[in-house]
């Protein structure tokens, strides 16, 4: 399995923007990509997933603020986050899961490969 490496996390004020990127060390076949997040003491939750630029799912909590995109040429997936809120503060994880689990793609249980995570902090 390939490894996933996230970048782009950091600290930002409320209302600001960040762009997270995730690069796979090798081509992953027949997978969808996703971003998940977790705060200490809470379960990991799905934020957004994408299937070959053909379909996306976005969690209701970030709808209209976050956008997921995929660049097949560079094995990279991005999460553009705008109008960030303090409740978006979390460790964000890049992930990949088998296409067969697409219809439950926002569930962490569907994921087969995880990145190490990148911290996003939204604070004034």
Image (cartoon, rainbow, N blue to C red):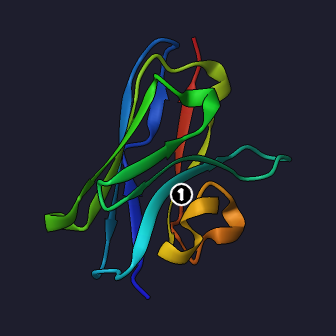
Residue 76 drawn above or below residue 114: above
Q: Residue 12, position in %: x, y? A: 46, 22
119 to the left or right of 39: left
Say which quarter of the image contains residue 17. top left
Residue drawn at x 38%, y 31% is: 18
Disc 1: which residue: 117
Residue drawn at x 58%, y 78% is: 112
Location of the C terminus by quadrant is top right
Q: Residue 46, position in %: x, y? A: 63, 49
Residue 91 drawn above or below residue 94: above
| Furthest-right residue in this view | 41
8 to the left or right of 106: left
Q: Residue 109, position in %: x, y? A: 71, 69
Mark 1 closeness class: few <14, some 14–19, many ≥20 residues within 10 Å: many
Residue drawn at x 53%, y 57% is: 117
| Furthest-left residue in this view | 73
Q: How many marks?
A: 1
Location of the N terminus by quadrant is bottom left
Q: Secondary structure at mark 1?
A: loop
Residue drawn at x 39%, y 79% is: 30
Say which quarter of the image contains residue 103. bottom right
Residue 48 drawn above or below residue 14: below
Residue 63 drawn above or below residue 99: above
């Amino acid at each position: 399995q390939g490894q996933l490496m996230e970048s782009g996390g950091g600290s930002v004020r409320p209302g600001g923007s960040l762009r997270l990127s995730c690069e796979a060390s090798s081509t992953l076949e027949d997978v969808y990509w996703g971003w998940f997040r977790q705060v200490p003491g809470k379960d990991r939750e799905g934020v957004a997933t994408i299937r070959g630029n053909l379909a996306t799912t976005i969690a209701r909590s970030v709808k209209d603020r976050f956008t997921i995109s995929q660049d097949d040429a560079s094995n990279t997936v991005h999460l553009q986050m705008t109008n960030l809120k303090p409740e978006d503060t979390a460790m964000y994880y890049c992930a990949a899961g088998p296409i067969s689990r697409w219809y439950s793609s926002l569930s962490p249980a569907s994921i087969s490969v995880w990145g190490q995570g990148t911290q996003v902090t939204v604070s004034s």
